[in-house]
Image: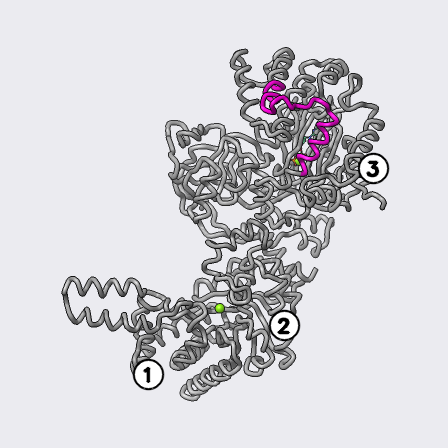
Amino acid sequence: MSEERYIYDLADGDGTMRSLLGGKGAGVAEMNRVGVPVPDAFTVTTTACVQTMNNNGEWPDGLADQIAQGLKRLEERTGRTLGGSERPLLVSVRSGAVHSMPGMMDTILNLGISDESVVALAEEFGNERFAWDCYRRFIQMYGEVVEGVPQNLYEDALSELKHHRGVDQDTDLDADDLKGLVETFKQISNDHLGGAWTADPREQLNRAVNAVFKSWGNPRAEVYRRAHNIPASLGTAVNIMQMVFGNRGDTSATGVCFTRNPSTGEKALYGEFLVNAQGEDVVAGIRTPRPMGEMKDVLPEAYEQLVATMHKMEQHYKDMQDMEFTIEDGKLYLLQTRNGKRTAAAALKVASDLVDEGVISQEEALLRIEPGQLDQLLHPAIPPEHGQIPIAKGLPASPGAAVGGVVFDADTAAERGSKGEPVVLVRFETTPDDIHGVIEAQGILTAHGGMTSHAAVVARGMGKPCVAGAHGIKIDPVGKTLTIGDRVIKEGETITLDGTTGDVYGEKIELIPPQINEDFERVVQWADSVRRLGVRANADNFEDATKARELGAEGIGLCRTEHMFMAQDRLPAVRRMILAESSEQRAAALEEILPMQQSDFEGVFTAMKGLPVTVRLLDPPLHEFLPNLVEQSLLVQRLEMSGGDSEELGEAKQTLAQVKRLHELNPMLGTRGCRLAMLYPEIPDMQTRAIVRAALAVREREGETVGVEIMIPLVALSQELETQRAIVVAAVEDELAQAGAELDYTVGTMIELPRAALIADKIAEHADFFSFGTNDLTQTAIGISRDDAENGFLTQYVMDRVLERNPFETIDVEGVGQLVEMGVERGRSVKPKLKTGVCGEHGGDPDSVEFFHGAGLDYVSCSPFRVPIARFAAAKAVL
Ligand code: ADP
Ligand code: MG
Ligand code: MG
């Protein structure tokens, strides 16, 4: 059996090999291919990582050999030897997955330095301090990442040394200091490992590769993957790359740059650098770097070269690039390039500009936009004139407004945030380990770190407002206080961040609703001209329906009527209707409700100005309208004990009896939807009359036609629909006859029970349209209670990846998806033109929208704020 190939030398790869070499590996190979200077390297494939994961951490046969050979070739090409006492080779061991996960996995720098090679390195570059600086960095990084030595052991030793020497900065330590520090670090490592510290660079290389494999599975990477729906099965590649040194003195530097501004999309140089530093110093946010523009003065030639390279790479990739570079003694090297993570606003602007610049087509522009991300555009903002004075200022690292209580650690942020409490995470600097807190926080404030730190990149990718490097603030994570000037802010006190300007306010500012910008208007038109799938909204009142129209909804796909019943001032009448002992009593209660319903419908019809509106007839479980069984029992008891008003007691007892009679153990599978209407036909009759009267009134008043679609919920049996349809039609015809008017209308049904999908052909005989209620369909097909899902095993399933995604967020294509496809197919086998749509959360989920497009539905309907997302997702489904 011929052995699988696990290693690709730099020259053997190219930009198309992302899934094998990871984004980083493919990126450097591609840069090398087109003549951009990158350090020499070889890459261990993602396959090697996956096979290792699937084999309990054992490397596949041949991998160790192939790495040794790859190293040998690299040594030959560079004329250097790993750990050699002459012309030593130092390498970095870098993680690099298919999807970029900034800072989530591990990277080790300066591997190959040893007691022998450190001397050779010092001699070669005539710089002793530099060589020992590399060595101490290596021992610390390797110790932490590969051997699990606690970081603070090294940090404490470093602080102690600085204190002892009476200096402030690492850079104030001289070669002898660092030499001593290396000894201390070695001791620390060796002690921690009980004497098992290995000093052999080749052995270290293998262990480092293995540590990077393992870092794919570390908790923060897992949290990040879950937040971005990246499959856990992909694994990471490992890049072994010759070190270039940004820390060789004042003619050396390292930095990160973007070809455009990733916050706004503006075409302007954006980036940061540090002189005499190694890459980690910038991206880890430990030192606050200098803005790119200043590099022009410090390192003019390298700067010109960098600007030219950035332009070249953007033209080559036809997209905004995020690049890492190092300058070693005036010579520029690129270490990484990737499509830059950006905010939604930037995504739209970049796409729109690239079309104007003739770089990409409109369709390519659409493919550049992540529909799910557009959510960000729809967040509230700080009003331009609010009269508050900022108490601190930092870098505007990720735009948008965040209001929330201050918390000082990621765990608390995650805990409170996940319960719906708005929090702002305040940290000295954020590290990738804070990711779970970042996800749940409204925004991030740091005292340290720059615009291109991992924290800033991750925040922008998620659309979280972030103010970074606010030097004026003092954070006491133990005492849990934030001090700005003489103001002390305690945990839980509310602050406001403006990530667009970098301003921090010491109080809550009332935000204003989001504004859709011009770039959005322009690009969404392109999406509309491409998509086939219609996009409607779910809305129950004038305000929501108006918002939906503004955001481009082409109708209402679901107008629920139970919310209208639930309003406090209506509940008494609704209860009387349900608890009625006779048809007459019920009719009387309904008489009271009818005008209220009518006015609700008038609001929605008015807002939609003639666009179709699907009104779903009543669909709540009964108990939602009734007094709670336990509470009612307690009330009776209390009245009995207090021996009070006997009339009141009598009423309470009667109500209790009725509640008991109607009590259901499984209300979600009980008397809901059309089942209620089958028991009490007066209800659909009343609702239909309210709809017709509203439609006629609006037509009369606004002069607009009204697209009335009446929908029967929770049908399982064709007989149910036949009966309900007859009730609806009779009521419509009666109303129209009384009014002497005509009205176009249709009557359709929800398909939200598996049985309905199975017998869709029979049901279609009585339906003008189907609307798949995928929430209930998911609940009933998988048998998971949607209301309990978040608290129960489902969360665990998603954590453990028993399920890749929560089926209430994104459609379960494999299972529930089949029911949708079957429903469409069987329905259309009877009525080829049967109109089909989806309402429910899935209608606003990009992946689900793609599936619905493929299943041949006519439209999706989602909440108003998801409408823009659905418009883009529907376009992408076509492309
Ligand atoms: P991440 O994925 O966390 O950004 P990287 O593998 O990109 O990790 O490494 C982090 C930093 O280390 C890079 O920004 C780069 O500046 C520096 N670095 C990595 N490899 C080298 C190298 N061969 N020479 C010099 N610096 C390097
Ligand atoms: Mg990087
Ligand atoms: Mg339902």
Q: Is residue 484 left or right of residue 76?
A: left
Displayed quadrant of residue 303: top right
Q: Position of residue 232 (x, y in %)?
A: 64, 48
Q: Residue under circle 2?
A: 822
Mark 1 or mark 2, earlier in chain: 1
Image point (60%, 14%), residue name: 173
Quarter of the render that holds ligand 1: top right
Asked if residue 708 shows in the view, the reply is no
Q: Residue under circle 1?
A: 583
**Disc on res. 745:** none
Circles 1 and 2: CB distance less than 8 Å? no
Asked if residue 513 shows in the view, the reply is yes
Q: Is residue 152 left or right of residue 16?
A: left
* Amino acid at pointer 3: Ala
Residue 775 within the magenta-colored segment of the rendering:
no
Q: Which residues are magenta?
A: 185-213
Quadrant of image for the C terminus: bottom right
Q: Compute the Cα span from label 2 to label 3.
A: 50 Å
Q: Compute the Cα span from label 1 to label 2.
A: 40 Å
Q: Nearer the viewer, residue 203 or 383?
A: 203
Displayed quadrant of residue 661: bottom left
* Amino acid at pointer 1: Ser
Identify the colour scheme used: one colour
* Amino acid at pointer 2: Met
Mark 1 or mark 3, earlier in chain: 3
Image vertical order of residue 372 relative to residue 594, above or below: above
Q: Residues within 10 Å of mark 1 (few under 14, many from 20)?
A: few
Front tag of 1 and 2: 2
Q: Residue under circle 3?
A: 11
Q: Compute the Cα span from label 1 to label 3.
A: 84 Å
Q: Position of residue 673 (x, y in %)?
A: 45, 73
Q: Position of residue 76 (x, y in %)?
A: 85, 27
